[in-house]
Image: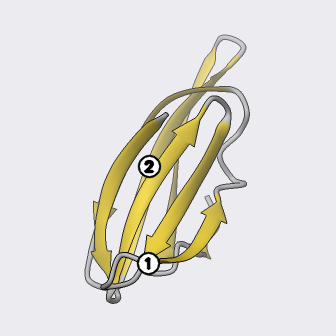
Amino acid sequence: MVFEVIGKIDGNFLIYKNLKSKSWITVYDNDMKEVSKVALDFVPDDRLISVDFFSYNDFFYAIYQYQRKNVVYCKAVKADGKGKNIRNP
């Protein structure tokens, strides 16, 4: 399992987790109780190369790269403090 702490956004702690071809964000409150688990459906099942996060007070950007056949793609998505997409990739 790969995980990364995204940060505290809108009063929630967000943690990115990846296991094989599944990716999700787990949202915790101030008491570190799990609030929700949001599947990242926009991340393809292809070979995921990297995922980086840039967090702000009320949203974050997830920039991810994946390989499909011989082409490497780089996309970004904007999401809120509950892990839900604000804008599509």
Q: Pointers 2 and 1 in contact (CB under 8 A)?
A: no
Q: Residue furthest top?
A: 70
For residue 15, above or below residue 45: below
Rendered location of residue 85, percent (x, y)? 60, 73
Q: Residue at x 40, y 59 (%)?
A: 15
Would you name the residue on which mark 2 appears? 63
Q: Between residue 26 and residue 87, name the one nearer to us.
A: 26
Circle 1 packing at 10 Å, graded few (<14), some (14-19), many (20+), is few
Q: Residue at x 66, y 11 (%)?
A: 70
Would you name the residue on which mark 1 appears? 33
Residue 52 shows up from this direction: no
Q: Between residue 71 and residue 58, name the one nearer to us.
A: 58
Q: Between residue 63 and residue 9, name the one nearer to us.
A: 9
Q: The residue under label 2 is which amino acid type?
A: Ile
SS state under label 2: strand
Q: CA distance from mark 2 to mark 1?
A: 27 Å
Of tags 2 and 1, which is closer to the observer?
Answer: 1
